[in-house]
Amino acid sequence: MEIRLDRAAFMAELTPMQGIVERKSTIPVLSHILLRCVGDRLQLSATDLDVSLTSSVTGEVTREGGIAVQARKFSEIIRALVGDEVLLALEDEKTLRIAAGRSRFKIRGLLPEDFPSLPQVKGDEPLEIPFEGLQRMISKVIFAVSTEESRFQLSGALLHIKEGKIEMVATDGRRLALVENPVDGLPDASEGVLVPRKALQELQRFEGDGAIQFRRGEHHLSFRLGQRELIGRILDGTFPDYDRVIARDNDKRVSLDRKLLIDAIQRVALLTGDRARAIRLRFAPDEVVLSAANPDLGEAVEKLACEYDGPEIEIGMNPDYLVQFLVAAETAKVRLELKDENTQCVGFPIDGADERYLCVVMPMRI
Amino acid sequence: MARIHLLPDDLISQIAAGEVVERPASVVKELLENALDAGAGQIRVDLTGGGKRSIRVADDGLGMDRDDALLAFDRHATSKIGTFEELERVATLGFRGEALASIAAVARVELLTADEPGEGHRVRVEGGRIRRAEPAARDRGTTVEVASLFFNVPARRKFLKTARTELRRSVEVVQGYALARPDIAFTLSHEGRALLEAPAAGEGGAGMAERVRQIFGASLVDRLESFGVEDGVGRRVAGLVGDPSTARPRRLFVFVNGRLLRDRAILATYYRAVRDEWRNEEFPSLFLFLDLPPEEIDVNVHPQKAEVRFRSPAILNEVSEALRAGLARSLGEVAAPLSEPWRRPSAPAAWEAGDGGWRRPPEGGSFGGTSVAEGLPGGRLAEIHLHPGRPATVPLSGRDGQVRPFRILGQYKGTLVLLEGPDGLYLIDQHVAHERILYERFRRDLERERPASQRLLEPQLLELARDEALRLGELAGALEERGFSLTRLSGDSLGLTAVPAALGTDRARDLLLELARDDDEAAGSGVEGLDRRLLEALSASLACRSAVKMHDVLSIGEMEHLVSELFRAEQPYACPHGRPVVLTMEDAELERRFGRR
């Protein structure tokens, strides 16, 4: 292979590859990216076997061919080079020559055949999803995705395309976030699909506007934006029946200022121990009292105005779960719906955008 | 009308029997122990119906005369101890005097025994009542036949498993005792089919290996490596350990003074040794024999004697070293010679804190019989003062009754705290020491306050067998105190609706499954035992996270604090996982090594 490239354009495609590449993989080739000259383009691919990213950049190709190079080192070199142009050429089948300005590098690589072949997601016409909307949805649920590795069916978010709208849900069994956005022209897909966390994270890093082309294959999902394509393995397993889990008869409704509540929670939470983070919220008419106590540290109490006219109720919750919801909610005010100390708290934004958003937080007994 | 009334005697016996007799295997165990205690040279066990129909154990031991034969069925009749003092030094296997009476309360038992050849007696007991006693002929020895176990306690009979499962458990019991006593001939048959034939194999290491061969075959013996030492005066820490290919569940045998145990402390020591030496989570076959003077161990901690308490925890270090040497050898390595001269610390256990220092207790000298709990009463050692930077005020080998301050010498490679003690050099592993301190603090906290409990969105299903569900059900209260909530879903499946907030959901569920599936023997210690283990699991997982790490450089002040906290700990010598915290090199040893003695 031999190709002359615009360095800045190349760098723009090279950087997102780093998120996919495994830093400490036991399979050496997975710390590599594959470079391949085809037609008038250089194709780039990276994979951790679950999530793959491919992209391409145009250049002057004089010879086709390819090589897999160590991702981090290669990217450091390209970034450090001086000059607008960079030349990549195979010295021999396992050595890549890099030239830019007055710098010359020769780096060892692996045969392209040793690089895993990436799954192809074929199928029907892709669905068009507004990219910005998708990113917004991801940011509203990704914090609820489980980090417990053994709970694989919860280690992703459920993406459910319905007629004229998209729904996304994530839960780790202790809280649950659900967002639903209207999207014109979507057909009804009978069932949702579990998107792994890493794919969600990479989608958040994508840049650009317009629409993502979404395809669903038998085992993989494809998200294509411009020349980039992210392919993720569909997570197996049964996602909880979330519709059934969300409480509908929480009769105590409290409205609060979102920013003030975030600040108050974070202050009070300073006095939660390292063993388990828990704060108490006592709701009385027009006032909520937040408190935390820890035998080793001490106590913290803070009062905050709210709109509430029901009976007094106290509930314990993990402050992090609440804050993550509140940050994602974005609106000036939020509503918390409660029933009793043992029942879930359901949070909603008030007067938000044209979307449905809610977050369930399970209570704690302190 | 009176609501409270006294229980009839036979019901009391049946309830009490439950402590000892749970299933055929526990009958086999009690009868084998009696046979061994009677000095048998040959023991024969015959079972039918997996032991549910009948169990017969015949020995050629001492036998009994008529009076003894009748008395044998009395509760707490025993030939083995008579006074409390003797209880302290039990060398025989059975001692509570409840075995035969307990068995007879829930089965049809026939005892045929003779203390002189030909002059035997036959006693039949049914449901705790003597039905018949008559002379009968027999060679010297005793035969006990136990038929229709739990014929009068249907509730218990229901909990017996299939004949095959019950048989397997009995086979394990017989195997255990056969391994413990290679010098005695064992045979085991089921419905006429021989399952085990092990002629007397002699004593010592050779006998041990031969017995393993008789039971598990030559292919296993070839993959075992022997380790450990006998000091010739009845002390032995020795055994056989396999190479990695011998890893099997249920192939870990620990014998303390001839008694097969599932002692958690020893097993933890073993697991730790394997992890450290091999970086492995598969545990090779182990046959470990500890023979200690009876006064060094307390067997009265567990109704089924499945655990013992060591008066001196230093024994665990000794076990750990022997195991590590064996493990290294079975990987084809030679044990590092350095480990040999290091003695386990035992002295501080026997000291009392005086005003600002340490004194030996008046009885002085030997520390073997003093338990740590006695030597380090909580709080009293708060007085200990350390004198960093000051020159030692006493000679390295001091005399009794003298104040002996400790002095911190410094930190070694950011991992060990070096301490000058009155009788030698102390090395303290800072990470493990901190872990021990935190662990005990967490345990106290957990006893004091209910830990925060996180409710779950949906109940986590726990699929359990009947007995497992029952065991967890019994513990519901204790679990609730620890932050768990359970709900019955259907049949024997329970749902987990809340977990301790400090544990991950999966970790919490696994912990419950472990508790539910714990071996019968271990579960014998009841609610309290399970609760204790739960506490330990919680505390241990929490303590490990926040302990100071290796390679944290500590100031003198930090070291001083660490050491004084450690000496205040209830159990300063081993971390929650069983690793040693302190090593000592005694002055005598140092002097010997420098050629001064």
Image (spheres, coloured by chain):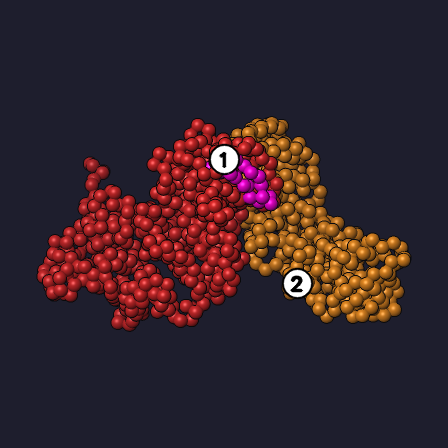
Chain colours: A orange, B red
Measure the C-alpha gap from mark 2 to mark 1. Answer: 52 Å
Horizontal side of B107 relative to A352 (left or right) equals left
Badge 2 crowding class, 10 Å Cα cut-off, few under 14, some 14 to 19, many 20 or more, is few
Q: Quadrant of the N terminus of chain B?
A: top left
Can residue B485 be seen in the rendering of this structure? no
Q: Amino acid at mark 2?
A: Ile
**SS at badge 1:** loop
The residue furthest front is B596
Residue A350 visible in rendering = yes
User: Residue type at mark 1?
Assistant: Phe
Q: Which residue is mark 2?
A: A27
Q: Are marks 2 and 1 in contact (CB under 8 Å)?
A: no
- Let me know if residue A263 is in the magenta part: no
- Residue B274 x/y as whole percent: 49, 57
Q: Chain of mark 1?
A: B
Judged from the image, the secondary structure of the residue bearing numbered disc 2 is: loop
Q: Position of residue A123 (x, y in %)?
A: 70, 66
- Select label 2 or label 1 by which is in front: 1
Decide whether the magenta segment is chiefly helix, strand or loop.
Answer: strand
Left or right of A249 on screen, residue A73: right
| Location of residue A118 with respect to A307 vertically, above or below | below
Q: Residues within 10 Å of mark 1 (few under 14, many from 20)?
A: many
Q: Nearer the viewer, residue B473 or B54?
A: B54
Task: Read off the chain for label 2.
Answer: A
Q: Is residue A73 above or below residue A280?
A: below
- Residue at left offset 52%, top offset 43%: B428
- Which residue lies at the image location 64% right of the left edge and 46% below the top edge? A143
Q: Is residue B412 magenta?
A: yes
